[in-house]
């Protein structure tokens, strides 16, 4: 019976981990359901248009929250233009100036200034979505491949439109093929260049998705190990203490005092780990 109970608990923990990472048609809020100790699930409205499922999901809500927070903070920071910014405006301006002078201009040159609003919007939106993933009862919207694919598609269209606007359609297509290449090699180079054009945004899409998903899985796994291995340290400590008493019976007082202090420290760390487990893993 004990083995069956442990197996069932392990299966439930696995479901909780997967459910925390994946998107779902509900959000979790604390103390909205008396049947749940830490959180209750609030269902979100479903919507279908012309046979296409446009239901509101948890990640959609997180993106809305990130967008609202971004707009509110930006309006509050820059509602009164000042020569010398302070507070929140100083914080955002430092980030903007760094991205402009150290990232955009060295790579894109002076032409990059006109694309700076798009790049900054993309940066702050991803940043806010990532930070919201650290908030209890929230989720990381950038851990959804559909979200990162949408951002990659926007970047691809901007990149394609900028190339055509600067060089024209024919000039842009011509720039994709290296000059001086024998005509025979064009059969190979043209497909390779077209594939490379699509692979760049796709690679960034998968990279962001994998980083956020892998990070959350690693955190949840380590928090789960706290529950599984919480008694291992106490067992080793007691064994070493008994071994020390057997070797030096006259030092039993010092050994017992040190063992109790160490056990209290280990139990305190384990208790903190249990609290985080309850907040993050067992909210399902």
Image (cartoon, rainbow, N blue to C red):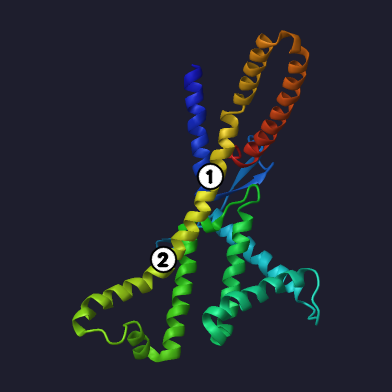
Q: Position of residue 280 (x, y in %)?
A: 61, 42
Q: Is residue 212 above or below residue 30?
A: below
Q: Residue at x 65, y 13 (%)?
A: 242
**Observer-nearest residue: 27 or 175?**
175
Q: Residue 218 — which label?
A: 1
Q: Is residue 103 above or below residue 279?
A: below
Q: Residue at x 47, y 66 (%)?
A: 150
Q: Position of residue 253 (x, y in %)?
A: 78, 13
Within 10 Å of disc 1 (Cα), the crowding (few <14, some 14-19, many 20+) is few
Q: Position of residue 125 (x, y in %)?
A: 60, 66
Q: Residue at x 59, y 69 (%)?
A: 123
**Observer-nearest residue: 242 or 33?**
242
Residue 54 is at least partly visible in this image: no
Q: Residue 183 — which label?
A: none
Q: Is residue 276 above or below residue 205?
A: above
Q: Residue at x 74, y 21 (%)?
A: 260
Residue 123 is at least partly visible in this image: yes
The residue beneath circle 2 is 202
* Left or right side of 202 for 35: right
Specify the farthest residue to the left.
184
- Quadrant of res 188: bottom left
Element under disc 2: helix
């Amino acid at each position: 019976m004990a083995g069956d109970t442990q197996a069932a608990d392990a299966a439930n923990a696995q479901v909780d981990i997967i459910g925390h990472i994946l998107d779902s048609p509900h959000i979790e809020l604390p103390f909205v359901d008396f049947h749940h100790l830490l959180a209750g699930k609030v269902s979100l409205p479903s919507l279908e248009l012309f046979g296409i499922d446009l239901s509101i999901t948890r990640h959609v809500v997180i993106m809305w929250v990130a967008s609202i927070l971004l707009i509110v903070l930006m309006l509050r920071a820059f509602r009164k233009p000042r020569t010398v910014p302070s507070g929140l405006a100083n914080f955002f301006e430092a980030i903007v100036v760094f991205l402009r002078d150290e990232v955009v201009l060295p790579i894109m040159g002076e032409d990059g200034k006109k694309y700076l609003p798009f790049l900054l919007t993309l940066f702050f939106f991803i940043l806010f979505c990532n930070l919201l993933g650290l908030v209890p009862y929230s989720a990381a919207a950038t851990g959804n491949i559909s979200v990162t694919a949408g951002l990659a598609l926007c970047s691809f269209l901007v990149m394609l439109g900028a190339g055509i606007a600067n060089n024209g359609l024919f000039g842009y297509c011509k720039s994709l093929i290296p000059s001086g290449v024998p005509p025979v090699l064009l059969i190979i180079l043209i497909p390779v260049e077209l594939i490379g054009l699509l692979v760049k945004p796709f690679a960034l899409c998968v990279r962001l998705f994998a980083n956020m998903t892998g990070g959350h899985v690693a955190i949840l796994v380590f928090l789960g190990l706290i529950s599984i291995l919480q008694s291992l340290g106490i067992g080793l400590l007691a064994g070493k203490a008994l071994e020390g008493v057997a070797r030096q019976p006259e030092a039993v007082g010092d050994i017992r005092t040190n063992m109790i202090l160490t056990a209290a420290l280990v139990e305190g760390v384990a208790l903190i780990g249990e609290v985080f487990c309850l907040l993050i893993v067992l909210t399902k």
